[in-house]
Structure formats: C-alpha cells, structure tokens
Image (cartoon, rainbow, N blue to C red):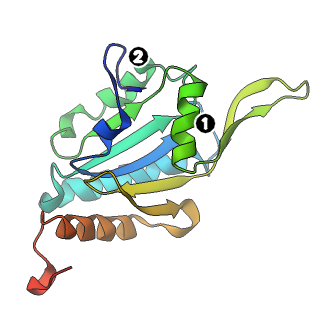
Amino acid sequence: MLEDNAWWPHRLSTYTSDKITLLSFFYSTCRDPEGCPSIWSMFETVHDLVKKNADFHDKVRLVLISLDPRVDTPERLEIFAAGRRATQSIAPWHFLTTWSDSFLGSIIESFGQAAARDLDANGNATTTVSHQVKFYLIDKRSWVREIYSSAFVTPDVIESDIRTLLIEHGDLPAIDGAKP
C-alpha cells in the first residue's frame, strides 16, 4: 500500500492506470546532483511539456515514490504536492510513500529498481540511499512500456513516447491518419 496522505492508503495501480504515467523513485533529502535533483528536473521539464500540449491535458500523471519512508512521511511529501495543486487537472503529480522499508522493498523489487541504504564505518545504516536513476513510462493498462536511464533520456524522447502511447490507446489521432 502507498500513501499520498496520512489517511488514505492506496494500491499502486491507483497511480498507474487510466492515464499515461511517468514514475520514478526519489527521496527528499538526496543531495547527489546526479540523483534525485536530476529526477526532479526531468519531471519539471516533462510537466512543462504536458502543460504546453493541450492534447496531453488530463491524460498524463507524474508519480514519485519515496525511497525513505522514515523521513518522507505523507505530511512531509504534502509540501511538494502543495506546490503542484494549480495544475492538478492538467497533469497531476503524486508524491507517495510507504509505511516502512519492508513495504517499499516489494515495490522497488517489482520495478527492478536497485536501492539500498549506505552504511557508515560501523555498519550502521545512514540516511543516504544509493539508487539507480530510472524513469518508467507506464501505459493506461499499467504496463511498463519504457524504462529510461538518466544517461539515455531526454524530455523530447519522453514526450514522443507519451504521444505514441496516447495514439495507441485511441486518445490522439494517428499522424496523417496512419494506424500505430
């Protein structure tokens, strides 16, 4: 179960069906410029592309799942969500967390996402979570259709793949009337 607020846990499928979903994993205290800040930057750019393209309005969602449920509580993640309220009807953002690392483990495993807490010199877990930077593009039927690594993705590629999925689902006409 995932939480987007303290009182309403939901299944992951709530956030991966009925719209095209761009999903990634992050944590709010990450400071590696090649890590979570790069994920955030990509999401901001894709969000701007969706806002500018009326064909994408209300057909795309952005989902970030925390890798640190001890720190990223629903209340803490609400700070991020509050800044996105004005465009929720155009392209909703969801900042999700779980109840514990054990709940999170099954989710990250199902996505093939590598993530682990770093250890200090004494073998104790630190607050740093080492993880791969991946972006998952999920179609309306909850199928992961693309997995992008940070080294091989641009916002234009994601935008093009979103368009392709919307055409496949019949939400946009095919270019020049051709079938996908």
Residue 26 is at least partly visible in this image: no
Answer left or right for 12 relative to 153: left
Is 51 located above or below residue 148 in the figure? above
In the picture provided, is 170 more to the left or to the right than 51? left
Of residues 72 and 115, the one drawn nearer to the viewer in this rendering = 115
Residue at disc 2, secondary structure:
helix
Residue type at mark 2 is Glu
Question: x%, y% of residue 67?
Answer: 56, 34
For this view, does 22 lie left or right of residue 176? right
**Any part of residue 42 in sight:** yes
The crowd level at tag 2 (other Cα within 10 Å; few <14, some 14-19, many 20+) is few
Q: Which residue is mark 1?
A: 30
Residue displayed at 36% across by 69% down: 156
Q: Residue furthest right?
A: 122
Residue depicted at x 18% and y 58%: 56
Quadrant in the picture for residue 106: top right
The location of residue 140, given as percent across then percent down, is 25, 54
Residue 1 on image: x %, y %: 41, 27
Give the residue type that dot 1 points to. Answer: Cys
Number of dots carrying numbers = 2
Regarding mark 1 in the picture, which secondary structure is present there? loop
Residue 75, disc: 2
Task: Look at the picture and state if 106 lies above or below 41.
Answer: above
Q: Residue at x 20, y 64 (%)?
A: 166
